[in-house]
Amino acid sequence: MRRGASWRGKDNLRGLVLSGGESRRMGQDKGLITQESLAWVNRAGQILQKAGVSVSVMIRETQRLEYQTAVLPDFELLPDLDLPVGGPLKGLLSFHRYYPLQNVLVLPADMPDLTTEVVHELIEFREQRPDAEAWVFEQGAHLQPFPGIYSYKLLAEVLDKAERQGLTKFGLLNLLESANTAHKIFEGQSAVFKNYNHPQDLTPQRPSQPHG
């Protein structure tokens, strides 16, 4: 078990990029889509890195060979684990197995409009609400699970329930609604939360997004 740290600050906060989806609708691995010579998975990792946290990238074991050559050497590759859940929650709980005493700042690889400034805002919000178990933005009366900060205590509880077959819903929104979640009203453009899922989302007119 890895050594824990104090609750506040970044000393027990680690960054996680989720890039283990099968990308069926896109027709290609979204994490490896490149804009201006930078793969989306690396762009997401750099956003987290610039926010001051170390970075892990969660993938499926079948992606390992491609990602070993594509992912920047600063980022740690982690294959997801055999757990009784699916979707993004599987990535979060796999991370918790690897780092059981680390809180996690997580975002997916397929949000290329996200900026470092938005992530910094979320980190600062967490400092204002240390009593919560999770920290996310609220935009248009909807909670946005990404970017999100999830405490190791919350993930431990969820993993325990999952392993005892106590989970009936695996969606992150269900998790956020049942947990002690602090949510900050987002006042910027809603486009930063857009997931790119279809080839038509990739238009030649769309410029590569700044790294923040």
Image (spheres, rainbow, N blue to C red):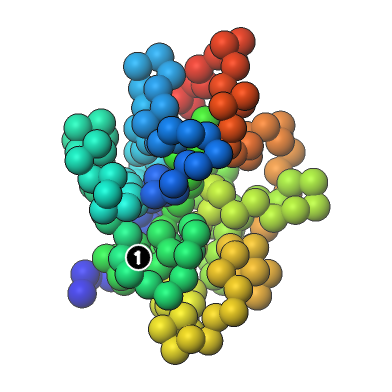
Q: Residue at x 71, y 36 (%)?
A: 190
- The residue carrying pointer 1 sits among few (fewer than 14), some (14 to 19) or many (20 or more) residues within 10 Å by Cα, namely many
Which of the 4 image quarters holds residue 36? Answer: top left
- Type of the residue with mark 1: Ser
* Residue 136 placement (x, y as % from top left): 61, 55
Please give the name of the residue rendered at 44% of the width and 46% of the height, measured from the top-left corner.
22
Q: Is residue 198 left or right of residue 91?
A: right
Image point 40% across, 67% down: which residue? 93
Residue toward you, 52 or 175: 175
Q: Position of residue 85 (x, y in %)?
A: 46, 70
Instruction: Look at 65% across and 75% down and name the residue there.
Output: 178
**Given the current orientation, which residue lies at the most extreme right position?**
141
Q: How far across and how far down the image is residue 98, in percent?
A: 27, 65
Depicted 211 relative to depicted 101: above or below: above
189, 127: nearer the viewer: 189
Q: Where does residue 45 sit, x and y in percent of width and height?
A: 36, 38
